Amino acid sequence: MNFNQMIGLLVLLINYTNLTEASSVRPVFESSRATDSLELVHLFQQTRGDLWKEQWDFNEPIDTWFGIQLNTNGRVYCIDLDGNPDCRSTKNGGNHLHGNLPNLSLPFLEHLFMSSNQLSGQLPSFEGTPELLTLQVSGNRLEGIIPEFSALQKLVKLDLEYNKLSGSIPDFDLENLETIYLGNNELNGWLPVFAFCDKLKHLYANKNNLTGELTGFSHLSELQQLLLSNNKFEGDLPDFFLLQNLTMLDVSNNKMEGCCDKKQYAHLRLFNIDKNNLNNCEDEKTNIPNAFSPNNDGVNDVFTIVDLAEYEKVRSSMEFVVWNRSNRIVYSDKKFKGSWDGRSNAGAALPEGLYLYQIQSVPINQKGTVFLKR
């Protein structure tokens, strides 16, 4: 830091001290461009600005400072210190930030990019940045638990990958959240269902210590990418193929068991279930059709299990359930006799489409899909 920078910083700090001398905690006062500049000075101090690759000249306006962008009212709306100050998630080696990330009070901040630095300590809750849309602090040394970020109701993207975060993952109550990147941390416990994140499109939680059984996320109709590899998940593979927008699924290197109907995932751009104990369901099935056409032409009008010899002793107690792609039960029969005509329990002809079925009776528990052609 040169002499002029030191003088500029001293002036800012004197003003800041006058504003805060009555309290040991930085107060919430009427915000302005001046208070924004003081928050940036605080960020500079807390993250060892003297070690930054690109430093700030406090004699110059804040809109000239590296990585800072202002909105039309002159307020800070973007901080990009990931090495490429374009206010986008283009990581480029960081800016040599060290120390703890402060709990900033910047009421108009929309984007915070601080990936690929050496930030440490716990992640703040950011209650002073209610307009935040993007929070990207991947590739640092952050530790401790993940806050619930309850004040960030506009948050769209959360990127916390490649840190040392531990504890369980919050079931975020953030209705606008579309992207959650939590891979390569030390997180444990069960994976939440994300009941309040209906807009979620990308969920990465690979390379952690997560356990328990997975849910099918049937309520996450917008989900496109689900990467959960290298954890300790157990149980059956849920019917993720019912997620109509899914393009990538990776649950490799877990402890999952049972069978998986691989043909239902043939359309995915990425599908990986390696290093589990999952077998192809088709290898275990009896002669069950995968399509039928109840159009009264005398050909394949009824869904029929051709070979029920092995089920003879339990046929009277066999249950048959059918779901549509919205995960709603459209037909059920607790005394299934081996055939179904494509109608609901109310007798209505079901529309053309792909349906999930389950045949269940001790010791049978078999799932599959069937295409109903009209």
Image: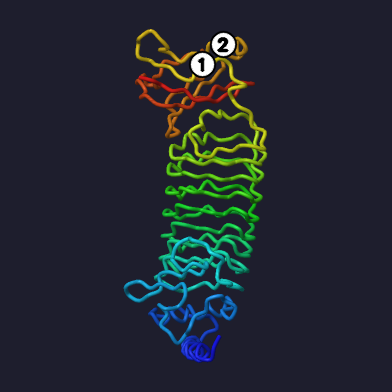
Given residues 287 and 1, the one toward you in this image is 1
Residue 38 lies, in percent from the top left, at 46, 82
Quadrant for the N terminus, please.
bottom right
CA distance separating discs 1 and 2: 14 Å
Q: Is residue 223 above or below residue 30?
A: above
The picture quadrant where one finds residue 229 is: top right
> What percent of the width, then of the height, locates residue 68?
44, 73
Residue at the farthest left position: 72
Looking at the rendered structure, which numbered label has been put on residue 307?
2
For residue 265, above or below residue 48: above
Q: Is residue 345 visible?
A: no
Q: Which mark is residue 336?
A: 1
Residue 227 located left or right of residue 296: right
Label 2 crowd (10 A; few <14 / some 14-19 / many >=20)? few
At a point 40% along the width and 77% down the height, the residue shown is: 63
- Which of discs 1 and 2 lies nearer the camera? The answer is 2
Check disc 2 and give the amino acid type: Asp
| Residue 374 in view (yes/no) | yes
Query: Element under label 2?
Result: loop
Q: Residue at x 60, y 41 (%)?
A: 251
